[in-house]
Image: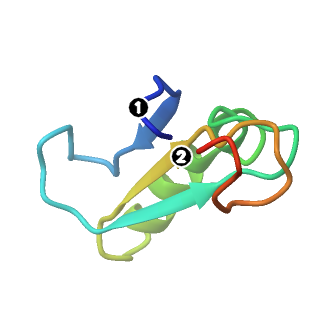
């Protein structure tokens, strides 16, 4: 985000923690949401736990704030 400080979150699968080498799914929120929406509404951390315990190979889910715009693209102001 052009040198700005932004919010982000990462969900790790069971048995994994920061620093572990894992594939990452990046979740981009919709208009009016934030990086927290995936955890508060969709409950990424709970879904990740369920699917990995069910046999899916471990991966992490990362969320990032993109502002209150409706689309993920470069803007005239540099964001």
Determine whether 77 is above or below 24 in the image.
above
Q: Residue 18 falls in which quadrant of the image?
A: top left
* Total tally of numbered discs in the picture: 2
- Return the residue at label 2: 63
- Residue 66, image x and y in percent? 65, 43
58 vs 38, nearest the viewer: 38
Q: Looking at this rendering, what residue extends furthest in the top direction?
A: 5
Residue that protrudes farthest toward the front in the picture: 76
Give me the disc on residue 64. none
Seen in the image, is 31 located left or right of residue 46?
right
Residue 15: give x, y in percent of width and height: 21, 46
Depth check, front residue: 21 or 43:
21
Label 2 close to label 1 by CB (< 8 Å): no
In-image side of 26 versus 38 (left or right): left
- Label 1 crowd bin: few (<14), some (14–19), many (20+), radius 10 Å: few
Residue at point 53%, 27% (across, down): 7
Residue, disc 1: 3
Front residue of this view, candidates 7 and 67:
67
**Label 1's element?**
loop
Q: Classify residue 18 as left or right of residue 70.
A: left
Q: Mark 2 to mark 1: distance in Å?
A: 18 Å
């Amino acid at each position: 985000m052009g040198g700005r400080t932004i919010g982000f979150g990462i969900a790790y699968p069971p048995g994994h923690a920061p620093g572990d080498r894992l594939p990452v799914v990046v979740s981009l929120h919709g208009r009016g949401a934030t990086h927290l929406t995936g955890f508060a509404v969709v409950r990424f951390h709970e879904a990740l736990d369920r699917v990995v315990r069910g046999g899916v190979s471990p991966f992490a889910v990362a969320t990032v704030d993109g502002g209150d715009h409706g689309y993920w693209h470069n803007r005239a102001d540099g964001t």
